[in-house]
Image: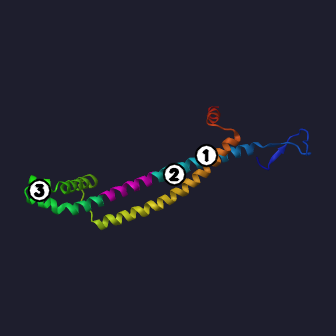
Amino acid sequence: MGVAARSTSGPKGRNGLRACVPLRSEKAMARRTYGQLEKRAAEAADRLHVLSEQIKSIEGAMSANAELKGAVVDYAKTRPVFSGYKAAKYSKKYLVEHKAEIALYRAAQETFRRVLSGAKLPKMDALKAEYQKLAAEKRATYKEYRAVRKDTHEVVTAKENIDRLFGLTDTQKNKEQER
């Protein structure tokens, strides 16, 4: 344990020193320190989960942004074809000739409805700027995530080592808590 130990009144050992028994305060301090380690491990794991959820949220926003940008490009490319289809008064012949382009136009419109939920279509420059902002936010969050993951790994490893050193397992901990 620590340096502050009392000697027993028993016989001297081989080296002429009395056996040392840890003081009760040292045991209490060790339990308190272990408790702090457990608390720190739990807090680090919670923080890791929060950062992981933030990264997933950012990635979802980036995916929606990329999907929207793709739909804008498809819409812009196929709009003249659909205008011709409307001008031809929805002719079946025109539809057969331009079926792929019209399907792409309708898919782009469906993407707008699904992603924007009726909101106004943003400009492509705004979409690009938002994507860059999200990418920068993801990089910063992921940098913090890596640091927290490393810290969590170190704390959990230290806690597991102490558990093994003291021979504590989950069942033994539960028994101690029941007492």
177 and 24: which is toward the camera: 177
Q: Which of marks 2 and 3 is nearer the N terminus?
A: 2
Quadrant hosting residue 106? bottom left
Across and down, in percent, residue 172 comes to 65, 34
Circle 3 packing at 10 Å, graded few (<14), some (14-19), many (20+), is: some
Across and down, in percent, residue 55 comes to 44, 55
Is residue 20 among the parts visible in the rendering? yes
Helix, strand, or loop for circle 2?
A: helix
Identify the residue position indicated by label 3 in the image. Answer: 94
Labels 3 and 1 touching (C-beta < 8 A):
no
Q: Does the magenta stretch include residue 66?
A: yes
Residue beneath the point at 48% across and 58% down: 142
Give the number of marks.
3
Labels 2 and 1 touching (C-beta < 8 A):
no
Q: Give the range drawn in magenta.
A: 53-67
Amino acid found under the numbered disc labelled 1? Glu
- Mark 2 and mark 1: Cα distance apart in space: 15 Å
Helix, strand, or loop for circle 3?
A: helix
Residue beneath the point at 78% across and 43% down: 23
Residue beneath the point at 13% across and 53% down: 96
In the rendered image, the residue lying farthest to the bottom is: 125
Q: Is residue 84 above or below residue 166?
A: below
Across and down, in percent, residue 7 comes to 85, 43
| Colour scheme shown | rainbow
Residue beneath the point at 16% across and 56% down: 98
Q: In this view, does 148 lie to the left or right of 98?
A: right
Amino acid found under the numbered disc labelled 2? Leu
Q: Check residue 38 in the rendering and tell me which mark sits there, or answer none.
A: 1
Is residue 36 among the parts visible in the rendering? no
Across and down, in percent, residue 156 comes to 60, 48
Identify the residue position indicated by label 2 in the image. Answer: 48
